[in-house]
Amino acid sequence: MIYVLLPAYNEAENIRNLLQTLEEETQRLGSGQSSLSPNSPIHAVVVNDGSRDDTGAEARRFSGTIPVTILEHETNRGLAAALHTGIAFILNRCGEEDWIVTLDADGTHHPKYIFALAEKLETGYDIVVASRYAAGGKEVGVRTFRKWLSHGARMSYRLCFSRWPIRDFSCGFRGMRASVLRKTVAQWQEKLFEAPGFACTGELMLKMLAHTTLDRVTEIPFELHYEKKGGKSKMPALKTVLGTLRLILRARRWL
């Protein structure tokens, strides 16, 4: 089983189309256009994080064949809380060898890469990252300032954790083996997410790495299409930069 976790805040114009695209890619898998076993069903889990628009209603209007669970936060609690809610729901239901894939719900991450991540997991990897910085990956439509921030974060992570075969620690598009995520949650429990803002994606990656080995972590190239993003960016730039720097300094003693 592949659980697809979609944290969503004010994504009414994106979420139903994303689920439709996910179904189309699942059908492509079933038609034999992927090396992944066709016996790997999809279950999408949308966490509507207190959206002020019709995100929840739009997700419920999806009428495809893949199962979709919609979890609701009454108020906006942030990305970390949305991830925490979705992870708790999935780990309560999944098996040790099931896979969990997280990605953004804003249209910038194409669901076709879910199955490329899963193909790697099927060969024995524990963590697979969809990386903008891997050979063949790229960013499209990203403003210069935001690109500088992303590359600054990338260099900081690589400087401190260069032995790990990852170029993109902070990208939220990744696949994980449930057993590794379960061990991480068991260790950290309510402190699974402590970093502020969007730095929580890098935090989760660093905490998971303590429960695997170098040879079971890899990445695949993917294209981030920021020009397809619907709505305004929700990332507070300064808060995320400072949170990332503090996280990296703390995390050096974890690994």
Image: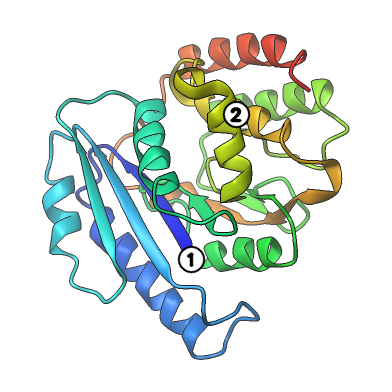
Q: Indicate the secondary structure of the residue bearing disc 1.
A: loop
Residue 62 appearing in the image: yes
The front one of 241 and 82 is: 82
Q: Identify the amino acid type marked 1.
A: Met
Residue drawn 13% across and 63% down? 61
Q: Residues within 10 Å of mark 1 (few under 14, many from 20)?
A: some
Question: In the displayed structure, does residue 66 sit left or right of residue 206?
Answer: left
Which of marks 2 and 1 precedes in the sequence? Answer: 1
Q: Determine the image quadrant of residue 119.
A: bottom right
The numbered disc on residue 62 is none
Residue drawn 27% across and 61% down? 68
- Where does residue 248 sit, x and y in percent of width and height? 69, 16
- Where does residue 63 sit, x and y in percent of width and height? 18, 72
Residue 175 appearing in the image: no
Q: Could you tell me if the residues under marks 1 and 2 are in contact, i.e. CB atoms within 8 Å?
A: no
Identify the residue under disc 2: 202
Q: Residues within 10 Å of mark 2 (few under 14, many from 20)?
A: many
Identify the residue under disc 1: 1
Figure label count: 2
Quarter that holds the C terminus: top right
The front one of 255 and 7 is: 255
- Where does residue 237 sit, x and y in percent of width and height? 47, 19
Question: In the displayed structure, does residue 10 sit left or right of residue 205?
Answer: left
Q: Indicate the secondary structure of the residue bearing disc 2.
A: helix
- Where does residue 246 sit, x and y in percent of width and height? 62, 8
Q: Identify the amino acid type marked 2.
A: Gly
Say which of marks 1 and 2 sits in front: 1
Above or below, comparing residue 234 to residue 216 in the picture: above
Question: In the displayed structure, does residue 20 sit left or right of residue 50?
Answer: right
Residue drawn 67% across and 28% down? 206
| Distance from the alpha carbon under mark 1 to that under mark 2 | 25 Å
